[in-house]
């Protein structure tokens, strides 16, 4: 692991404006580098302050110009652009410093969508660390104390892109099968959708849909496992060391964003991946990548994540019995 920042006193300016999952995954770099000044959008500033190795955060305010932001950034010994966008490039030009920049693999990712190419793309974390000139450190990169009740389930049902969401009825089926406490995590605009899952499941669920991450981090200290799609809060749970099950549909686990210990549940369909980031609707109309993922398959993945030897009971059913039912149903 690099000790450049912490041992030499040299500072590193890291730029990553958005989005949540991308900012979360920079924890691998900030942990390895240390002595970091982090530049991000205002909505992620509180999260950036929690990242290991970050000593200061400069937040881009809504509507603020790049030139105004540049004037507020303190001196640093080097600049690492982990965004690679037009805005981050303009900021680097205004700063007038040598820049180490992320390879976005944009062409390779577009080709995966166009040609359904099976080749694995380097993970985001691998590309982040390559840009910063550090080896990928051991996970978890933002460890949290584990002090909650046994058997707590965290669910992340929503996503910014609608076609990356597992259907509500399936989330309801999962929650009904879970015996322990359940937390539904989301952003401030997702509270109503999360409460709908609570209502349909006819059981007590704590809905955490906050403008910030204070209560979210408290929940992540308490849960035994988090289940979510390819979205920021699922990545946050994994970075914090929480066991995770990822439900992937229009994107795939080999597109670069799955870089966690855990299990992915996904269907091997010829139409996948259909997008680099997600979209509003399924391009061919059937949303089979999510519709064909059964509640039993997700329960089985949870079982394996929590207890690989298969001794844990999920809703009164041993892992072997559950897998037998899945095989029979298929």
Image (cartoon, helix red, strand yellow):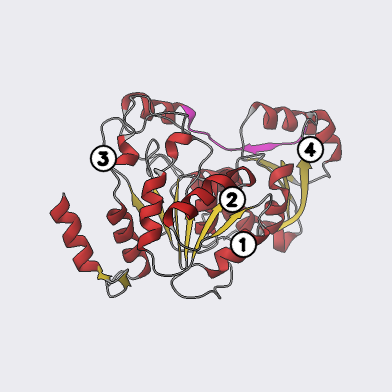
Per the image, the residue denoted by label 3 is 268
Spatial CA distance of label 3 from label 2 is: 28 Å
Per the image, the residue denoted by label 4 is 61
Write the start and end of the magenta stretch as one range: 96-106
Residue 138 visible, this angle = no
Q: Which numbered disc, 3 or 2, marks the residue that appears first in the sequence?
A: 2
**What secondary structure predominates along the stretch shown in magenta?**
loop
Query: Is the Cβ of the residue at disc 2 closer than 8 Å to that at disc 1?
Result: no
Residue 58 lies, with reference to residue 274, above or below; the image says below
Q: Whole-percent x and y of residue 139? A: 50, 62
Residue 79 lies, with reference to residue 7, above or below; the image says above
Q: Whole-percent x and y of residue 124? A: 50, 44
Q: Badge 3, how many Cα within 10 Å: few under 14, some, many 20+? A: few
Spatial CA distance of label 1 from label 3 is: 33 Å
Mark on residue 69?
Answer: none
Per the image, the residue denoted by label 2 is 24
Residue found at x 68% / y 52%: 212
Q: Nearer the viewer, residue 218 or 41?
A: 218
Name the mark nearer the viewer: 2 or 4: 4
Per the image, the residue denoted by label 1 is 217
Name the mark nearer the viewer: 1 or 3: 1
Q: Badge 2, how many Cα within 10 Å: few under 14, some, many 20+? A: many
């Amino acid at each position: 692991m690099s000790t450049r920042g912490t041992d030499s006193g040299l500072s590193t300016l890291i730029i990553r404006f958005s989005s949540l999952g991308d900012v979360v995954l920079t924890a691998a770099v900030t942990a390895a580098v240390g002595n970091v000044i982090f530049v991000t959008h205002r909505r992620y500033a509180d999260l950036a302050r929690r990242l290991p190795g970050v000593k200061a955060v400069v937040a881009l305010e809504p509507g603020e110009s790049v030139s105004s932001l540049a004037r507020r950034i303190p001196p640093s010994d080097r600049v690492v652009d982990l965004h690679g966008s037009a805005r981050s490039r303009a900021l680097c030009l205004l700063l007038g410093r040598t820049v180490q920049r992320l390879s976005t693999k944009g062409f390779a990712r577009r080709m995966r969508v166009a040609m359904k190419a099976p080749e694995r793309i380097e993970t985001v974390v691998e590309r982040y660390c390559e840009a910063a000139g550090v080896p990928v450190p051991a996970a978890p990169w933002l460890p949290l104390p584990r002090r909650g009740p046994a058997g707590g389930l965290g669910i992340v049902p929503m996503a910014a892109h609608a076609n990356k969401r597992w259907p509500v009825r399936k989330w309801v089926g999962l929650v009904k099968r879970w015996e322990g406490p359940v937390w539904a995590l989301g952003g401030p605009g997702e509270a109503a959708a999360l409460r709908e899952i609570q209502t349909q499941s006819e059981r007590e669920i704590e809905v955490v849909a906050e403008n910030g991450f204070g209560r979210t981090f408290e929940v992540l200290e308490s849960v035994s496992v988090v289940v979510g799609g390819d979205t920021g809060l699922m990545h946050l749970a994994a970075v914090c060391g929480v066991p995770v099950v990822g439900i992937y549909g229009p994107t795939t686990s080999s597109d670069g964003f799955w870089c966690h210990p855990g299990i992915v549940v996904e269907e091997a369909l010829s139409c996948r991946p259909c997008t680099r980031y997600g979209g509003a609707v399924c391009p061919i109309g059937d949303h089979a990548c999510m519709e064909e993922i059964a509640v039993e398959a997700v329960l089985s993945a949870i079982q394996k994540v929590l207890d690989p030897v298969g001794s844990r009971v999920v809703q009164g059913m041993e892992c072997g019995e559950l897998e037998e039912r899945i095989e029979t149903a298929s």
